[in-house]
């Protein structure tokens, strides 16, 4: 009984650590995507060609075309 309680605690701690790590990774990716969108908006305002915006920001052409200014 004691061993199963410790195992359950370790399992819980490992699951939580994994979830936190994934959340941090997604946060970084989301932040990078938001930064790319901000750059794309500024490039569109400066009349850069869409293919060049896509090349610099790594956003798809569809994403860039749907940006409303």
Image: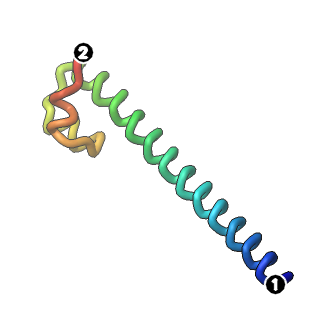
Near-viewer residue (33 or 18): 18
Residue furthest right as drawn: 2
> Which of disc 1 and disc 2 is earlier in sequence?
1
Question: Looking at the picture, how far across and down is residue 36, in whole percent?
Answer: 35, 36
Question: Looking at the picture, how far across and down is residue 60, in whole percent?
Answer: 20, 42
Q: Give the secondary structure at mark 2.
A: loop
From the image, which quarter does the C terminus lie in? top left
**Residue holding disc 2:** 69
Residue furthest front as drawn: 1
* Residue 10 horizontal side relative to residue 21, left or right: right
**Quarter assignment of residue 5:** bottom right
* Residue 23 horizontal side relative to residue 32, left or right: right
Q: Residues within 10 Å of mark 1 (few under 14, many from 20)?
A: few
Q: Give the secondary structure at mark 1.
A: helix
Residue drawn at x 30%, y 40% is: 57
Near-viewer residue (17 or 45): 17
* Residue 58 horizontal side relative to residue 34, left or right: left
Residue drawn at x 81%, y 84% is: 3
**Quarter assignment of residue 49:** top left
Separation (CA) of disc 2 from disc 1: 61 Å
Residue drawn at x 47%, y 39% is: 31
Near-viewer residue (63 or 16): 16
**Pair 2/1: label in front:** 1
Question: Looking at the picture, how far across and down is residue 48, in whole percent?
Answer: 18, 26
From the image, which quarter does the N terminus lie in? bottom right
Label ID, residue 3 = 1
Label ID, residue 43 = none
Residue drawn at x 86%, y 82% is: 2
């Amino acid at each position: 009984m004691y061993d199963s309680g410790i195992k359950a605690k370790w399992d819980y701690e490992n699951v939580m650590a994994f979830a936190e790590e994934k959340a941090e990774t997604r946060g970084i990716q989301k932040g990078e995507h938001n930064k790319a969108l901000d750059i794309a908006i500024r490039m569109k305002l400066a009349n850069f060609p869409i293919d060049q915006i896509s090349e610099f920001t790594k956003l798809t052409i569809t994403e860039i075309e749907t940006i409303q200014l």
